Amino acid sequence: MKYIPLSLVLVFLSALTATAARAQNAAALEHRAGEVCGQFRQTPGDYDKMFAPSFLAQVPAPKLTEIFSDYFSKLGRCTQAKQTASLSAYAGRFDFIFEKGSSVSATLAIDADEPRLLNGLLLGIPIRNSATLDEVVSELKTLPGETSLLITSLGKDGSRPILAYNADREMAIGSAFKLYILSELVREVGARQRKWTDVVPLDGKIASLPSGMLQSWPAGSPVTLHTLASMMISISDNTAADELLMTLGRERVEAILPATGHSKPELNVPFLTTLEMFKLKGEPTGQAATAYLSLDSKGRRAFLADTIAKVKSEDAKPFQDGKPAYVDKIEWFASATDMCRVMNWLRQQTEGDKTARQILGINPGTGLIIARDKWQYVGFKGGSEPGVLNMTYLLQSTKGDWYALSVGWNNQQAPLENQKLFALLQQILKII
């Protein structure tokens, strides 16, 4: 009999044990997914038999009932839970298939210990399984107000549009304007005029209103340019954006617009800080916006420096009624083509120093499930306010191909139902 060292036997047994454990975990995860599928009914319940106490502490039973019954009322029964990706030994992505022809992508996670209860469940937005890109555009056209869309393939020889609708229409983009501030920072770092590690003190006089958190930091706090850029992009921190804009210089940011391919940069002159926009739309007398709009660009610069600068930030109360305000006049403007161009410019400028590319990838967007088995890189910046929504992506497929995608929606008359556009975008990401 041939002698086999004990060490090899132990390694072999260890491998068998690991394989068996993985199979058990996969089976447990698939079983829990099946149980979740069964909860999409009119009267879901018995959550303690499938969800860990830690999960139920965050998402209590009444909330789960509301979620499951809502999906059921719109989509019908869940007929299948189909695994689409393994994320770890204890987590995976599934598609829940519903009887009315829709599916919902979801991420599930289970405990490592028996009885392997669910400790994580993230449900995506329902999408129609039979939808085509043309059908998505048809639905986009039905949304009230103005909409735009561009999906373009990015190559060494330029870009090639895949699907376009109103792609050259200049629209309000909300916080997506922060891509242009990032672009000027990238240019200055590339020209060795600045470094990512440069430190600036927060200027308390220009602390903006949320979103973000830097507005609550003490004045004078030392912050690196990298931190400002990361917070500006990943959590859309308004104070970070204003600090960077003032540090880099308003005119320099205005100059980067045509360099990135913006077709009508004059629409953004002067380039507003977020605090200035809030003050113009929400100062107490309600007269500032009218006065500002009556001026030429030189007069507007002076008005911002004199009149608007004197308005206390705590006195600015924009969007108190929740309705759109000056969506077509006081904003930051770009077309879907402009937005795809700036993403492509950033892609090209970050072939060497990938810092900005990494910053764009921190937050891939809220409310959407990105199939990481299809996309190896996802860069994102969005923007929203009453009547305004923009979502712009830089994507690289697992095959190495690059794409840019931008979708926008403006309505001067009423707030937007953001979930409708999220659903269409989720369909687009799945189809392409």
Image (cartoon, helix red, strand yellow):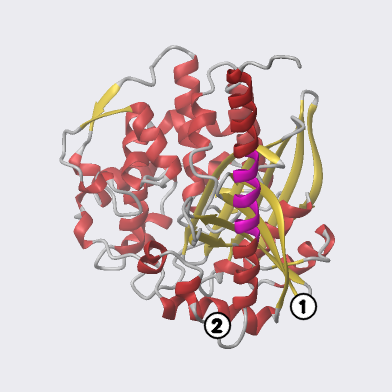
Tell me if residue 157 comes above or below residue 69 in the rendering.
Answer: above
Q: How many other residues sit within 10 Å of disc 1, few (<14), some (14-19) or many (≥20)? A: few
Front one among 337 and 373: 373
Q: Is 314 left or right of 47, judged from the image as shown?
A: left
Under mark 2, the amino acid is Pro
Residue 301 coordinates in the image, percent (x, y): 36, 42
Q: How many marks?
A: 2
Residue 41 coordinates in the image, percent (x, y): 62, 83
Residue 359 is a magenta residue: no
Q: How many other residues sit within 10 Å of disc 2, few (<14), some (14-19) or many (≥20)? A: some
Front one among 103 and 7: 7
Residue located beneath label 2 in the image: 44
Residue 419, quarter of the rendered image: bottom right
Residue 17 coordinates in the image, percent (x, y): 60, 38
**Earlier sequence position, callout 1 versus callout 2:** 2
Q: Residue at x 61, y 71 (%)?
A: 35
- Give the magenta-colored segment's residue range: 19-30
Tell me if residue 78 comes above or below residue 192 in the rendering.
Answer: below
Residue 377 coordinates in the image, percent (x, y): 63, 35
Residue located beneath label 1 in the image: 99
Marks 1 and 2 sit apart, C-alpha to C-alpha, by 17 Å
Give the secondary structure at mark 1.
loop
Furthest-top residue in view? Answer: 192
Front one among 363 and 138: 363
Under mark 1, the amino acid is Glu
What secondary structure characterizes most of the magenta part?
A: helix
Tell me if residue 10 comes above or below residue 418 in the rendering.
Answer: above
Give the secondary structure at mark 2.
loop
Residue 28 is a magenta residue: yes
Q: Residue at x 70, y 81 (%)?
A: 76
